Amino acid sequence: MKRNFRKYRTLIYITIAIISTEVFLRLLLGLGNPVLSQADPYTGYRFQANQKLFRFRKRIEYNQYSQRSEPINPQKPQGVLRILMIGDSILNGGSPTDQQQIISEIFKSKLLAAKHPVEVLNASAGSWGIGNHLGYLREFGTFNSDVVILEIGTNDLAQPTSTSAPVGNDPNFPTHPPLLAIQEAWTRYTWPRLSKIFQIGSAPSDFPLTPSSVEPDRQFQQNMQLLKTTVQLVRIQKIPIFVLFVPELSNLVPSSNSPKYKLEFIQQLRFLQVPLIDAESEWSTLPSKKVETLFRDGIHPNEVGNQALANLLFQQVSPIFHKQ
């Protein structure tokens, strides 16, 4: 017996280590159970419906319309205000952000505290552009919302509309769970970081890479046409529409550096008579050290930044509810 144990001891120890690692990754980190995506002819891609899971100790939930929100009734409940927000990874928050700390949920909490019965719907996905926003509205409509808010960031101004190409191919766009949590840990997190260290691959990211245009000037003009169509689609239903502009960290630090195309973007919004909630303008007067506390990386606000954005939304959007 002892001789047999010694013979297989290494194999037994390796098996125990693998099982222990698998259990640890699943129970404590939520690996092996990623948020799943699907290709879509309107939006390029969106998150699969009805997902509820924990990742890195963060709660993530998607409802029946691929919104990072709790399930909703298609018909707006009587006496309840409904706000539809559409955006990219900034609005979505991704796995690093708990459900209660995304912009839409903080905004909702502020409205509820102000005695406004409200639902705030979060239709978003990493690297969605202005064309993807329009696609979502064409596919699902406005849900009889009282207000529509488009979240647009610096990258979005000249970003092409994202397609379904990465779905099932990019590790950030899985269509089904991996067999093992260890498998996901290696392919999605460990290997990309090792590739970066040894300079044999691209840098890892919590979000898919934003597509870029070889002709940014032309792409910007196309995006402004897409924005105009989006506004018209919402206005036909007599719904107020706002734009929330979120800058990159480099637009503010070490000094204010307004992004290319923003002036023309503002002119387009004025022509369309769409109110702009401009986080860049609000944050440009803050000290650099303060601004840095608002971002998780060069693009995405952290929980503190989300709180600041929700404050801006509350200040500029909630007054219209007092008029109703």
Image (cartoon, helix red, strand yellow):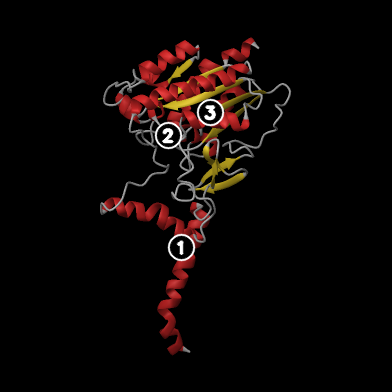
The answer to whether any part of residue 239 appears in the image is: no
Bin the neighbour count of mark 3 within 10 Å (Cα to Cα): few under 14, some 14-19, many 20 and up.
Answer: many
Q: Is residue 150 left or right of residue 76?
A: left
Closer to the camera in the image, 292 or 46? 46
Q: Alpha-carbon neighbours of circle 2 within 10 Å: few (<14), some, or many (≥20)?
A: many
User: Residue drawn 48% across and 24% down?
Assistant: 226
> Which residue type does callout 2 highlight?
Asn
Q: Is residue 132 visible?
A: yes
Give whichever of discs 2 and 1 has the lower sequence position: 1
In the image, what residue occupies the spot 36% across and 29% down? Answer: 248
Cα gap from disc 1 to disc 3, whole angstroms: 43 Å
Instruction: Name the residue that disc number 2 marks.
Output: 302
Residues marked 2 and 1 touching at CB (< 8 Å): no
The amino acid sitting under disc 1 is Thr
Q: Mark 1 near mark 3, Cβ–Cβ under 8 Å?
A: no
Q: Verify CB contact (< 8 Å) between mark 2 and mark 3.
A: no
Q: Secondary structure at mark 2?
A: loop
Q: CA distance from mark 2 to mark 1?
A: 29 Å
Residue at 40% from the left image edge and 18% from the top image edge: 265
Q: Specify the quadrant that holds the C terminus.
A: top right
The label on residue 105 is none
Find residue 204 and report its horizontal and vertical position in percent: 36, 47
Q: Say which element carries label 3.
A: helix
Q: Secondary structure at mark 1?
A: helix
Q: Position of residue 258 (x, y in %)?
A: 32, 20
Question: Residue at label 3?
Answer: 134
User: Tag 3: residue type?
Assistant: Leu
- Percent across and percent down for residue 306 are 46, 29
Q: Which residue does the numbered mark 1 point to in the structure image?
A: 21
Q: Earlier in the sequence, mark 1 or mark 3?
A: 1
